[in-house]
Every structure is written in C-alpha cells, then in structure tokens.
Image (cartoon, rainbow, N blue to C red):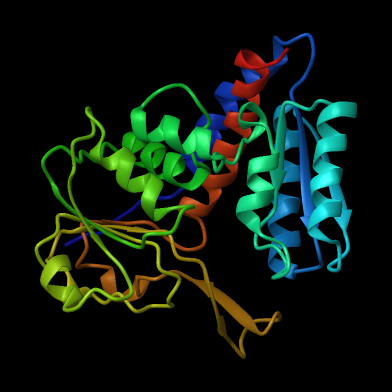
C-alpha cells in the first residue's frame, strides 16, 4: 500500500494566499501583539514563525518580551495597558507560562474578541455551540487539513487521543459538530487497553506528546493518522543534538497507513496559519 503524505505546507499556503488578498484590501492592516515570558527556546522559535507569517501576509506584529520572573499581576497589567493604549486586533500570550503564573487567569484578562488563540471561556463556549468566535488554532488547522485532502469524518470511527484544553477538548467538539459527524472515541493517558480502540478506528488523531509511541500494529491497515504531537528526541546526527518527531512512528506507518501527517511539516504549520486567520477575522468583524 502506498501511504499518502498529508503535507501541511500546501494547506497553509492556500490559507495565507486567501487572507493576504483580504489584508491587501484593508485600509488599516490587522495588528497582533504577542507576549513572550521567559527565554524558552521552543517558545522563541514558535514566536519567530508567527512573526515571519505575519510579515508575509501584511499583518503588523509586535512581540513583547518579558523576563521569567515577571509577576502575574505585572503580566495582567501589561495586557490591560496594551488593550487600552494600543488596542490591537489580536493578543496572544505564548505558552507555556512560568509556573508562578496561572494561565487561566491570564487568558481571562484578554478580551474575547482579541483572544486569537481561542482559549477564552467565551470563545470555547462559541466553539461548543457552533456560534461566532475565535476557535482554537490547532483544532481549526486539523479541520482545514482534512478539508483540503478530502478526509471525510461522517460516520467514521474516529479515535482522538488527548484531552487538553488546547487540542483535545476543542477538537472533540469540532469533530462532533453537525456537518462533520464523526463517530468519536476520546482516549487519554489513563485509558486502559488503548489498542482495542485504535485497531477499530478509521481515523486516529494523536495529541499526547509522547515520541513514537503509536505503532502500525496498533491500527488497521489503511487507517488515517493525524499526528499532532511535537516531541524532541536526542540525536547525535543533528547539529542541535535533537530531532523533532511526532507521536506516531512515521517510518513504521509508511506502507501501512492510508494517509499520515509528517512531523515536522504537518499540523504545526496550520496552527500558525489559523492564528493569522483569526487575527484577520478579528480586524474584519470585531474592530471598534
């Protein structure tokens, strides 16, 4: 069996092309402010990718760098000052945050119409109800990828592994929505006998952050694998000393899976693309 590779780049390029045309017609370009607390290398790299994407499509992006020891109150104040003084269309706080800062409290400070990450309770509620709001970027990107490649969830046995607030829970709601109509099973780290679920699945979506744990003998031949995991493993052959891999053992699935997303080069590219789309939508529909 030849396995179809579900590359994220053509999907992202299509999204960027569409929103760049919209931005080009706007008198005032969309504005995005990103708060980065601390000096985590992965977070810095991710923020740089957002900056490059914003420049590519004409979004005005500003990154606010704050030290690791920034207090929760100071971060709250910085966000409120940003809203009052700059009034950008989108505000994003890069996660993970230092342990002394409560992420739920910080998310609630961002006005829901400017929460382009889609994590404010009001936006999560809109996602659950299927009403207007900013939807979480990675789940939205997965749905965009599925649409691009013609992956039909209707009635399909779909196993989602992971229940995080950023991916698992919002994605479950999108998969169950009318029009998508997946027959969904949600598994997680405490699920016993995971293979009894994955072996029956037509589509497996993994978002647990455990390197290469999903093997081909855990799913039936021809299954669609959507890998959301981004994991670092040590590698002596890499200049950085590590390699990026997904939850699924990519090489193991070639010739067995019907389709699979690569890591890197798959879902991750669409997370940034959907962030840009949310920022443009904020400027179009919520700007005062």
Q: Nearer the viewer, residue 130 or 272?
A: 130
> Which residue in the rendered view is the most extreme toward the bottom?
236
Instruction: Point out residue 235 in the picture as x, y percentages from the top left corner.
Output: 58, 87
Quarter of the rendering containing residue 150? top left
- Dividing the picture into quarters, in which one does residue 253 lie? bottom left
Q: The C terminus appears in which quarter of the rendering?
A: top right
Give coordinates of residue 203: x percent, y percent. 21, 54
Does 61 appear above or below 229? Answer: above
- The residue lying toward the viewer, choosing from 122 and 179, is 122
- Name the image quarter holding residue 181: top left
Q: Quadrant of the N terminus?
A: bottom left
Where is residue 60 shown, x and y percent of the image?
80, 30
Q: Is residue 91 left or right of residue 82?
A: left
* Identity of the residue drawn at 85% across and 27% down: 84
For this view, does 43 lie left or right of residue 16?
A: right
Residue 266 in the image: state x and y as whole percent: 46, 54
Q: In percent of the image, x 73 and y 68: which residue is there?
A: 100
Residue at point 38%, 78% (across, down):
212
| Relative to 56, residue 205 above or below | below
* Left or right: 196 as drawn, with respect to 143: left
Task: Pick whichever, 275 or 2, lies toward us.
Answer: 275
Q: How many marks?
A: 0
């Amino acid at each position: 069996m030849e396995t179809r590779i579900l590359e994220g780049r053509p999907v992202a390029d299509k999204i960027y092309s569409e929103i760049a045309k919209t931005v080009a017609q706007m008198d005032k370009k969309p504005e995005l402010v990103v708060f980065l607390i601390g000096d985590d290398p992965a977070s810095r790299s991710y923020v740089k990718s957002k900056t490059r994407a914003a420049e590519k499509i004409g979004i005005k992006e500003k990154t606010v760098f704050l030290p690791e020891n920034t207090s929760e109150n100071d971060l709250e104040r910085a966000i409120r000052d940003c809203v009052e003084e700059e009034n950008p269309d989108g505000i994003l706080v890069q996660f993970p945050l230092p342990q002394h800062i409560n992420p739920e409290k910080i998310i609630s400070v961002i006005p829901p119409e400017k929460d382009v990450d889609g994590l404010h309770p009001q936006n999560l509620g809109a996602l659950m109800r299927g009403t207007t709001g900013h939807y979480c970027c990675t789940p939205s990107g997965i749905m965009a990828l599925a649409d691009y490649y013609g992956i039909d969830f209707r009635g399909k046995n779909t196993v989602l592994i992971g229940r995080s607030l950023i991916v698992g829970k919002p994605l479950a709601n999108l998969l169950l929505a009318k029009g998508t109509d997946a027959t969904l099973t949600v598994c997680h780290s405490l699920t016993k006998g995971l293979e009894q679920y994955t072996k029956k699945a037509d589509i497996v979506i993994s978002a647990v952050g455990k390197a290469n744990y999903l093997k081909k003998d855990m799913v039936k031949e021809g299954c669609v694998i959507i890998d959301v995991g981004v994991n670092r493993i040590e590698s002596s052959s890499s200049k950085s000393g590590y390699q990026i891999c997904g939850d699924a053992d990519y090489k193991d699935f070639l010739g067995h899976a019907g389709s699979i997303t690569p890591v890197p080069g798959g879902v991750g590219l669409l997370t940034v693309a959907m962030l840009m789309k949310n920022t443009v939508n904020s400027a179009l529909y919520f700007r005062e």
